[in-house]
Amino acid sequence: MVVIIGAGTNVTSDKISSGLVSVSFTLSPQVERLFQLGSFNAFDTNITTQESASINSYGGASTPVTLTPSTDCTDSSAKMDITITPAPCSGSVDPITRTGSNAMFITGFSYSKDFQGYGQESWSLTGKPIIEGFAGNIAYIQGFSEGNRLTGSDIVSNDGVVLVDSTTGSSGQVDATGRSINVSAGSPGIGNDDDQDFGRATQIGGAVGKEDGKRGTSSASIPHQLIFF
């Protein structure tokens, strides 16, 4: 078992300049075995390897990303360059570099902040599948992004998600607004009465870090679809 030391681990990203709280990276091979009658030896194997990563960072240190659904068979523009250089207790490990044409695609974003303290952003990333023996081309196109965010006088000035309505794409308009009230008995027995907007997400990132007396919650889902050609 290799133990990784956080204080010695370095992570860089073209979308996040500093304030990284945690990072994870997973390389998951999926093995499909093709068996034949009369033998336990596989006739052949199909191996597809999937990469995924997640990054948590403090607000105020990221660059906004514009979300534009694909209109042709080219890769999505919602991408992030990341380099992870782990610091193990003993020995050394190769850094994980996913930049340029190998940059990872952004599939999810969320932001959370309480009245006190710093807000935090969470980014979900995925790479193109690595298919053993595949010699063709793969495009990872971006679909229609959806999001939601809290609104109100006690909400932060920027929660990292920009919404428009789905029919016209008009700024300042959304598809729907919900409401949630929760309060508990006791002294002082305080609670929340929140409005929450839902709509098409056109931008993520760039949320505030410290904004005293304000809170916020937002999230966006950025679907992607593989095209083989």
Image: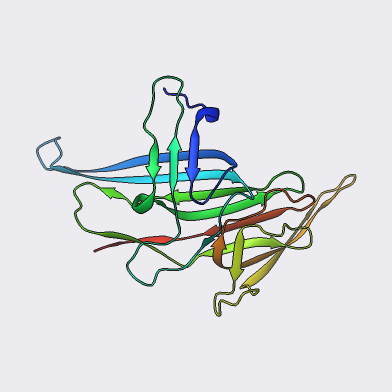
Q: Nearer the viewer, residue 134 or 81?
A: 81
Q: Residue at x 57, y 63 (%)?
A: 147
Q: Residue at x 76, y 45 (%)?
A: 116
Q: Nearer the viewer, residue 112 or 19?
A: 19
What x and y, as percent, mark residue 150? 69, 60
From this viewpoint, which residue is outermost toward the left? Answer: 38
What x and y, as percent, mark residue 203? 55, 63
**How does the figure colour the protein chain or chains?**
rainbow
What x and y, as percent, mark residue 129? 32, 50
Quarter of the figure with the N terminus: top left
Q: Can you tell which quarter of the image residue 225 is in?
A: bottom left
From this viewpoint, which residue is outermost toward the right? Answer: 187
What is the tally of numbered marks visible in this picture?
0
Q: Would you place residue 229 above or below residue 90 in this image?
A: below
Q: Would you place residue 123 above or below residue 157 in this image?
A: above
In the image, taking residue 139 as reference, residue 217 lies left or right, namely right
What x and y, as percent, mark residue 22? 55, 38
From this viewpoint, which residue is outermost toward the top? Answer: 90
In the image, taking residue 181 as reference, residue 33 lies left or right, namely left
In the image, taking residue 75 as reference, residue 149 lies left or right, namely right
Q: Nearer the viewer, residue 138 or 167?
A: 138
Q: Residue at x 49, y 31 (%)?
A: 9
In the image, taking residue 150 as reference, residue 162 lies left or right, namely left
Quarter of the figure with the C terminus: bottom left
Q: Residue at x 76, y 63 (%)?
A: 152
